[in-house]
Image (cartoon, rainbow, N blue to C red):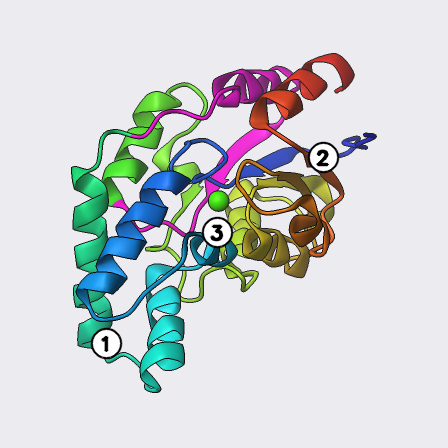
Amino acid sequence: MSLDLRGKSAVLFDMDGVLYDSMPHHVQAWSRTFADFGMHMDPLEVYMNEGCTGSYTISKVSLEQRGREATSQEIEDIYAHKAEIFRTLPEVGIMPGALELMANVRESGRKILIVTGSGQKNLITRVIRDFDGFIVRERMVTAFDVKRGKPFPDPYLKGLEIAGTGADRAVIVENAPLGIRAGVAAGIDVIAVNTGPLPDSVLLDEKPCALFHSVRELADYWKSNV
Ligand code: CA
């Protein structure tokens, strides 16, 4: 795998499935939530939709399964229910290799940002604590900072604005197909890390510049090659 990072001054990290091994929790929370509201969502679908805001996912499922848009009140209630289930699950673990990757990125002199579609307040608070020394709230884009989430480019464009850098000077680390699509739409090179159950081809279809099979593999690569 060759990856050219010359001229890149900022690294924009996705959060779920990259910094935290949180996707199995999201699968559980979404499955239970949709069941409680008379709809359903398969695990693989959670991975396919990953990266979108909760309201985007809820609207999509409602339209597909109930033949109508969810009202804004329903979206609010359903997302609150999902967030509450997520909150009651055991604490998610930091992704193996994520702290090492952050350290290697900082060591290589790049600016670090987090760009997430998440509106999960407890996890947003936690990331600042867990990655203390690498990340500050001012360098995070969350579901609260943009109107249109991934797969639109908006969150990553906002990230560039905060980093004060052009698209050609940044690189993204993403695990989700729609997250990669958002990054590519923003004109930024995306490094894919396939940390979930989807085949590589689903991620490669979105045209990342490289693909690794774990965050640790990328951390090791960064240490020896960047
Ligand atoms: Ca993700």
Picture residue at 30% right of the left edge, 47% below the top: 28
Question: Which quadrant of the figure contains the C terminus?
Answer: top right
Q: What residue sits right under mark 1 in the picture?
A: 72
Identity, as a three-letter code, of the amino acid under mark 1: Ser
Identity, as a three-letter code, of the amino acid under mark 3: Tyr
Local crowd at mark 3 within 10 Å, few (<14), some, or many (≥20)? many
Q: Is residue 104 magenta?
A: yes
Q: CA distance from mark 2 to mark 1?
A: 40 Å
Residue 192 image offset from top left, x and y in percent: 65, 41
Question: Which quadrant of the figure contains the N terminus?
Answer: top right
Marker disc for residue 212: none
Q: Nearer the viewer, residue 203 or 7?
A: 203
Horizontal placement of 170 versus 37: left or right? right
Between disc 3 and disc 2, the foreground one is: 3
Between disc 3 and disc 1, the foreground one is: 3
Residue 219 visible? The answer is: yes
Residue 27 image offset from top left, x and y in percent: 36, 48
Above or below for 50 versus 171: below
Give the extent of the magenta segment.
Answer: 92-120
Residue 140 image offset from top left, x and y in percent: 42, 41
Residue 63 image offset from top left, x and y in percent: 37, 81
